[in-house]
Image: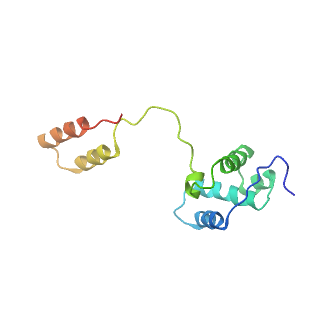
Amino acid sequence: MPSKHTQQIILSEQQRNALDLIVRQRKSSQAMVLRAKIILLGAQGKSLQGTTKELKCNRETVTRWRKHWVERSDEIPVLEKLKEAPRPGAKAKFTEEQICLIVAMSCDKPGLKAHHKMNLALRVSPVS
């Protein structure tokens, strides 16, 4: 019987299938797999303590991700519900396009043209 302190998790068939897929995929990150397992065990009615023992993680992790799942809308895709919330901090200094250009230019042969290209690339559309 679930504890009264445990977050009640109810999954649709589609959500359950998506979480099962995350757990089974070889390319899923370990963090995503752990979060998916926490949600699946919660939906099965597994207690907080039982989940922590089975997954060998701490109580705060289980509590956090169950709460995170319940608080997010069911309209959000499963992968989005399992992602970390954005963290505060400085914004990126370069756009992804600029980073790709810098990496591509770093693979070119060195020379004066590369130096001018780099300067142009960094001047164009800074991140605001």
**Relative to the observer, which residue lies in front, 53 or 120?**
120
Q: Splitting the image into 4 quarters, where does residue 35 fall?
A: bottom right
Question: In the picture, which quadrant includes the N terminus?
Answer: bottom right
Seen in the image, is 128 located left or right of residue 69?
A: left
Does 104 sit above or below residue 17?
A: above
Q: Which residue is drawn at 74% across and 60% down?
A: 43
- Name of the residue lying farthest toward the right: 1
Residue occupying the far left of the picture:
112
> How far across and how far down the image is residue 77, in percent?
56, 57
Number of numbered markers = 0
> Quick one: which residue is furthest to the top in this view?
90
The C terminus lies in quadrant: top left
Tell me what residue is drawn at x 22 percent, y 47 percent: 105
Toward which corner of the image does residue 123 lie, by quadrant?
A: top left
In front: 70, or 64? 70
Q: Residue at the spot x=85%, y=48% of the render?
A: 4
| Relative image position of residue 3 (x, y in whole percent) | 85, 51
**Where is 85 relative to 78, above or below?**
above
On screen, residue 41 above or below 62:
below
Write down the quadrant of residue 122 in the picture. Answer: top left
Q: How is the image coloured?
A: rainbow
User: With 115 as the anchor, is 83 left or right in this view?
Assistant: right
Q: Position of residue 22 (x, y in %)?
A: 58, 63
Q: Which residue is drawn at 77% across and 62% down?
A: 44
